[in-house]
Amino acid sequence: MLAPAFEELTGISVTHNIIGEGDLVDNMQTQMQTGRNIYDGFINDSDAIGTHIRYGTTINLSEAMENEWTDFTLPTLDLDDFIGIQYTTGPDGSIYQLPAQQFANLYWFRYDWFQREDLQEQFRDIYGYDLGVPTNWTAYENIAEFFTEHVGEIDGVQVYGHMDYGRRDPSLGWRFHDSWLSMAGMGSPGVPFGNPVDDWGIRVDEESRPVGASVTRGGGTNAPASVFAMQKAVDWLRDYAPPEAQGMTFGEAGPVPAQGQIAQQIFWYTAFTADMTDPSVAVTDEEGNPKWRMAPSPVGPYWDEGMKVGYQDVGSWTFFDSTPEDRRTAAWLFGQFTVAKSVSLEKLLAGLTPIRESDIFSDQMTEMAPKLGGLVEFYRSPNESNWTPTGTNVPDYPRMAPLWWQNLAPVISGEITPQEGLDNLAEAMDNIMARLARANVFEAYAPVLNEEQDPEYWLSQDGAPKAKLDDEMPQGTTVPYDQMMEEWMAAGTR
């Protein structure tokens, strides 16, 4: 839609390719390493911000807008209106990427089933508390067990209390490095990401230099909280999800809740909201109103106040110094066009991936809100800022992200234990960081790994990594959805 409109206005022809995320990251990495121009601009996740601040090949947008792009920057760009600009900003205060779309990982559930008095009474008889939005992982597990084993069937259809995916595939990495460990409480307090230990388990020093992922170096990747999180992922997928989910990828599993068999999903991307609102799907009523709702995800037993609660994806325009200046400037113009205020609201109404505060609070979104199951309320709440992307602790996202699915796929399939898989992952992360430091490839914030010590040295100190809890499954707690939304919206204004 936008490329032809841009050409009509400017005479600049735009060719844009939609490719798989793995291929995109490979192309980006090749361009950064070789200096050969492959694309004039990328939509690259802000998860790579740690890469962009270190290699010295990504255009510093703050500097460019003050210098070579002074005459090519929209006077109405209004950076303060972007709700995700803090995620594309480095420790030096400079902006390296321009947000183009956002979506979060939230809790999704069948509101209509949770409201049924017969199911509420049955749940209370079995578990001793009310069926509602789970606020901790114990309650989530109880609800998953309830719908899978005790309810079993609704309106003649077999139902399940959980949905996930487990195929050995690059998308399995997203499932876990998208803040799964930090949802359990593995990292440190701090937003947009934990400091000193982030949601990957990587610890940094006071100068933002990574010092290790393993517990022996002060990291949290293989800490007790992480082991707990992985064990729950394995157990829930095996016991409470449809059997075919274990062989699914991200793309295959995403549409399944819309088919009407799933009671809840702890780790649901709001990017699927548009698919959930189609009047033809099983989870909307005759008027097109959702039978489902989204809510904040429950947190695990290691979680502390002040920590991030979940993940938010921020796809962002990214430019490299290897692109010839005229092409780079043209790409910057087109990138701004796709996020300009004259465009962004229409784009939000079509795709439901907001980037601007002014769009979120628009009359059009107020009108659409009842059809979107809580999406508008989520983005209007100040609590939204507790859902954040991967931060600046990760020094080389393209090299390190694949380590997750490669090391954790055997855990999901039962070949090795969660502890073994996370030990392997933490060691692989440390090895890559050490190798990159030796290669002297970074212009700034290069890793300086801590010497290994007995894990007890770190586990006995305050903060992450945290020692194993005596009780990892405390009493389940829930909140009625409508009460939760009132409290959510009363938290203040953005």
Image (tube, rainbow, N blue to C red):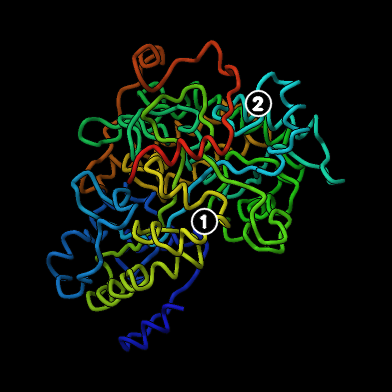
Look at 44% across and 75% down and name the residue there: 16
Dot 2: what SS? loop
Q: Is residue 144 above or below residue 15?
A: above
Mark 1 residue type: Ala
Dot 1: what SS? helix
Q: Is residue 159 above or below residue 126?
A: below
Mark 2 residue type: Asp
Q: Is residue 49 above or below residue 453?
A: below
Look at 64% across and 36% down and name the residue there: 412
Nearer-N-terminus badge (2/1): 2
Of residue 395 and residue 4, the one placed in the foreground of this image is: 4
Q: Quadrant of residue 199?
A: top left
Look at 35% across and 20% down and name the residue there: 463
**Do labels 2 and 1 touch, CB within 8 Å?**
no
Can you give x and y, in whole percent of width and height, for residue 61 in the image? 22, 61
Of residue 300 and residue 181, the one placed in the foreground of this image is: 300
Separation of residues labelled 2 and 1 (CA atoms): 27 Å
Say if residue 313 shows up in the picture: yes
In the rendered structure, the answer to whether residue 202 lies left or right of residue 237 reads: left
Say if residue 423 shows up in the picture: no
Can you give x and y, in whole percent of width and height, for residue 409 in the image? 61, 39
Of residue 155 and residue 235, the one placed in the foreground of this image is: 155
In the rendered structure, the answer to whether residue 483 lies left or right of residue 436 reads: right
In the rendered structure, the answer to whether residue 78 lies left or right of residue 133 reads: left
Mark 2, residue position: 130
Can you give x and y, in whole percent of width and height, for residue 346 in the image? 44, 70
Neighbours of disc 2 within 10 Å: few (<14), some (14-19), many (20+) = many
Mark 1, residue position: 369
The label number, if any, that marks residue 348 in the structure image: none
In the rendered structure, the answer to whether residue 400 lies left or right of residue 417 reads: left
Q: Quadrant of residue 130?
A: top right
